[in-house]
Amino acid sequence: MAPLGILMAVFVFLVFIRGFLISLTDAQGINHGSFIGLANFKAIAADRQFWTAVLTTLEFAGACLITQLPAAFLLASWLRTVRSQRIQAVLSAAFLVPFLMNSVVTALLFRMLFAEPGIVNWLLGLLHLPDQVRWVFDPEVSFGLLVGVAFWQGIGFPTIYFLTAFQAIDPTIYEAATLDGASAPVRFLRITVPLMRPAVTFLAVTSAVGSLVVFDLVFLLFQQGVNDNVRSILIYIYGKAYFGNLELGLGAAAGWIAFFIILVVSLLQLNVLGLGKPQEE
């Protein structure tokens, strides 16, 4: 455990401590700055753009949860009915491939598809539909585009995880319930839902955390077209720390506030979904 412990200490814990110390200074660029206490935290808390980014990020996380998890649950339910193991494996791999793709590749791929002019607008023109949509720059459609790209990339992992959780349920439980006269809806509500709750909780928390720290998709998909509708918390932090005046202290303070927001969201999810309650131990 010693090598792992050393790596964690150097690249995780010391980084956290260093980041907190920077948040208490007015550091800019290579200038270490001087100690200013909680001034950076007060400045971030009073910044309207930061809270707009927080709201946008929470909306994005919520959109990902309500689109990806139900769709993944339905896909997994369908996949487990496929009798051929070979076909099931091929379909599972097909769903998982986008998830395994690097986010940089995914963002650049969809940026080319939705560019002006791009393949998507060209296809819309062939169908005699509006073909001058500014997908990347128009605030009215950019958020939907981001959610769609995230759905395409992220649907694979929860699908395979749900499928594995389904397969882990002992079939004799369903057989016994059927013999007792339980209908399909009753079996679903009384057997499937309770036994799948740990999987749902795990996927809900990890999906929410992944959505709350979205950066590369936004940064590369929109580039100069980033607007308030798609500006995530990490994009805001990046802008504060590495653009303009290189205000590293403000960026570090925003990062710590974002950390506590993500922590609160995760704890609320665990409390609502109930993972770890005595009846599950």
Image: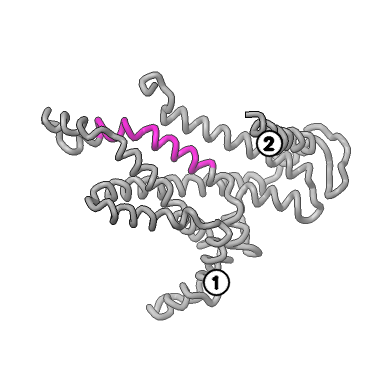
In the rendered image, the quadrant that contains the N terminus is top right
Residue 115 marker? 1
Residue at the top extreme of this rendering: 278
Task: Tell me the distance, in whole angstroms, between the alpha carbons under discs 1 and 2.
Answer: 42 Å
- Tell whether position 56 is magenta: no
Q: Secondary structure at mark 2?
A: helix
Q: Nearer the viewer, mark 1 or mark 2?
A: 2
Q: Position of residue 157 (x, y in %)?
A: 43, 48
Residue 11 percent location from the top left of the image: 70, 38
Q: Secondary structure under badge 1?
A: loop
Query: Looking at the picture, which amino acid does disc 1 mark?
Result: Ala
Q: Earlier in the sequence, mark 1 or mark 2?
A: 2
The mark tally for this picture is 2
Dot 2 crowding, Cα within 10 Å, few <14, some 14–19, many 20+: few
Displayed quadrant of residue 22: top right
Tell me the magenta residue range.
189-209
From the viewer's perspective, tell me whether residue 214 is left or right of residue 173.
right
Left or right of 1: which side holds 240?
A: right
| Percent coordinates x, y for residue 190 in the rendering | 24, 30
Q: Amino acid at mark 2?
A: Leu
Front one among 48 and 143: 143
According to the picture, the residue beneath numbered tag 2 turns out to be 7
Is residue 41 in sight in this rendering?
no
- Estimate how packed mark 1 is, as few (under 14), some (14 to 19) or many (20 or more) residues with alpha carbons within 10 Å: some
